[in-house]
Amino acid sequence: MKQITQLIATGANTYGNCIEFGAGGDSFTTTIQAQIEKTCAAIQADAKLANGFNIVGLSQGNAVARGVIEQCDTARVYNFVSLGGPHEGTSSLPQCPSGPICALVDSFLRLGVYSGVAQNHIAPANYFKDPSEIDTYLKSCTWLPYINNEQPTALNATYKAKLADVNELTLVKFLADTVLSPPDTEWFGFWSDASRKAITPMNQTAGYASDAIGLKTLNEKGAIKFVAQPGQHLNIDKALLDNTVIPAMRNSF
């Protein structure tokens, strides 16, 4: 990730910072909200980001990026490039790397992905969305229903205002992705129902219709760019960086 950061920074002739607060399994066993708070603290401590900045997120890092944009008291985010982000959730948990941490994760999951233990200790559980248990998801998932303004009793106008304020939102979907289910979540789409046979695209979702987080506002002013990238999850090549990511860094004002 540091190498990708350097390639982007060099190509866009700008400063780049790869924010890291842990290592190994920390990103799996620290809640998304805790990761957001630590990331925002790191941004606030970096004087070079004080006048605004761009964000490039990779996979789960896009959940953290969304939190930075919508929740944190930082300088303005100009452009957001999402590479394989679980924006509408995922109906299958990404595989944990092997080792003792993953053994602990597995034991927590046996209690149920929406259990308090799983929600408090497994980051992907915070954006797990089972299309056959939407009521349970809305009631017990502790992060995604809130950041997406899906909770009618907890709507946050600030989330909408801040995401709608970015210059451009670039959404990259990896066409052969088997890590996130469905891959369409990377374009803010999701399964239409529990059968998991059809997809509801972003512009047909209830959240889009109500402009819950500003996606309709962004789309109607031509500020959302949908990019289809061949290959598996995070198949990032130089062409993707040169033709999509680096150009997005230049619209900063």
Image (cartoon, rainbow, N blue to C red):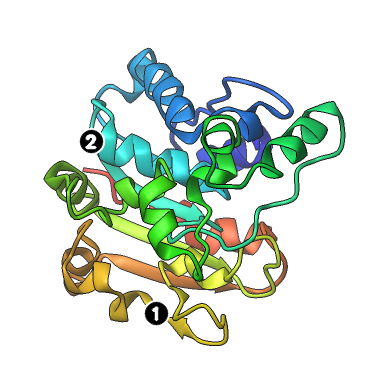
Closest to the observer: 74 or 144?
144
As helix, strand or loop, the secondary structure at mark 2 comes to: loop
Task: Identify the residue at horizontal 16%, vertical 68% (top origin).
Answer: 210
Q: Residues within 10 Å of mark 2 (few under 14, many from 20)?
A: some
Horizontal side of residue 99 vs 19, given as left or right: right
Task: Identify the residue at horizontal 56%, vertical 80% (top origin).
Answer: 196
Task: Identify the residue at horizontal 57%, vertical 56% (top origin).
Answer: 241
The label on residue 100 is none
- Please say if the residues under marks 2 and 1 sit with CB atoms less than 8 Å apart: no
- Image quarter of the N terminus: top right
Horizontal side of residue 8 vs 168, given as left or right: right
| Callout 2 amino acid | Arg
Relative height, residue 142 to residue 205 (above, below): above
Residue 226 point in image, percent of width and height? 42, 72
Closest to the observer: 213 or 111?
111
Closest to the observer: 252 or 176?
176
Residue 126 point in image, percent of width and height? 49, 43
| Callout 1 amino acid | Pro
Q: Which residue position holds label 1?
A: 201
Rendered image quadrant of residue 187: bottom left
Relative height, residue 231 to residue 33 (above, below): below
Work out which residue is located at the far right of the displayed protein and give it.
99
Q: Nearer the viewer, mark 2 or mark 1?
A: 1
Q: Earlier in the sequence, mark 2 or mark 1?
A: 2
Rendered image quadrant of residue 72: top left
The label on residue 76 is 2
Residue 249 appearing in the image: no
Residue 224 point in image, percent of width and height? 31, 66
As helix, strand or loop, the secondary structure at mark 1 comes to: loop
Closest to the observer: 3 or 45?
45
